[in-house]
Image (cartoon, helix red, strand yellow):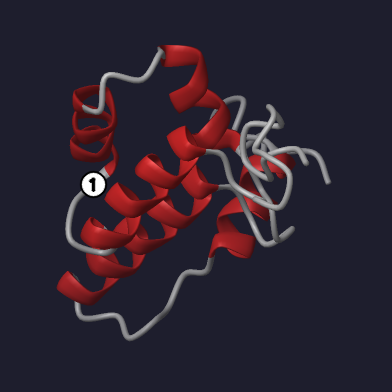
């Protein structure tokens, strides 16, 4: 069976390979507590190759947004909370914004 994160061989009955399980354990242990750069440092400390880490961050196994989108959504929620705005960002919101594109210049919003 293929790993639902990196699409490499996971084993006969496993849905997630050993490497991605390690990365997922790091993500779950620190979810909502640290930012993207700190996550990258922790992922690099696992000793896994860069390509594996990038594949894990880009993976969207549930169709709700990639792991990176989930991290950014948590960071956005924390930032909004610090500013006194009671709003919750979800990974789907980050995914939608990422796919929509970014501002090209002043007064030129992204194309729908």
Query: Observer-nearest residue: 90 or 104?
Result: 90
Left or right: 55 in relation to 71 = right
Query: Observer-nearest residue: 14 or 42?
Result: 14
Vertically, is 79 above or below 65?
Answer: below
Residue at 63 percent across and 54 percent down: it is 65
Residue at 67 percent across and 39 percent down: it is 11
Query: Observer-nearest residue: 95 or 97?
Result: 95
How many labels, in total?
1
Quadrant in which the N terminus appears: top right
In the rendered image, residue 84, in percent from the top left (x then y), is placed at 20, 80
Left or right: 83 in relation to 16 = left
Left or right: 34 in relation to 19 = left
Left or right: 14 in relation to 85 = right
The residue carrying pointer 1 sits among few (fewer than 14), some (14 to 19) or many (20 or more) residues within 10 Å by Cα, namely some
Residue at 51 percent across and 14 percent down: it is 51
In the rendered image, residue 46, in percent from the top left (x then y), is placed at 25, 28
Quadrant assignment, res 17: top right
Q: Residue furthest right?
A: 112
Residue at 62 percent across and 41 percent down: it is 5
User: According to the image, label 1 marks what residue?
Assistant: 35
Query: Observer-nearest residue: 89 or 110?
Result: 89
In the rendered image, residue 30, in percent from the top left (x then y), is placed at 22, 57
In the rendered image, residue 52, in percent from the top left (x then y), is placed at 50, 22
Q: Residue furthest bottom?
A: 86
């Amino acid at each position: 069976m293929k790993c639902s994160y990196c699409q490499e061989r996971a084993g006969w009955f496993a849905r997630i390979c050993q490497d991605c399980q390690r990365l997922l354990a790091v993500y779950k242990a620190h979810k909502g507590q640290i930012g993207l750069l700190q996550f990258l440092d922790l992922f690099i400390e696992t000793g896994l190759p860069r390509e594996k880490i990038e594949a894990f961050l880009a993976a969207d196994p549930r169709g709700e947004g990639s792991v990176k989108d989930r991290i950014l959504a948590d960071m956005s929620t924390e930032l909004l909370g610090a500013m006194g705005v009671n709003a919750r960002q979800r990974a789907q919101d980050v995914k939608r914004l990422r796919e929509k594109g970014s501002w090209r210049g002043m007064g030129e919003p992204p194309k729908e």
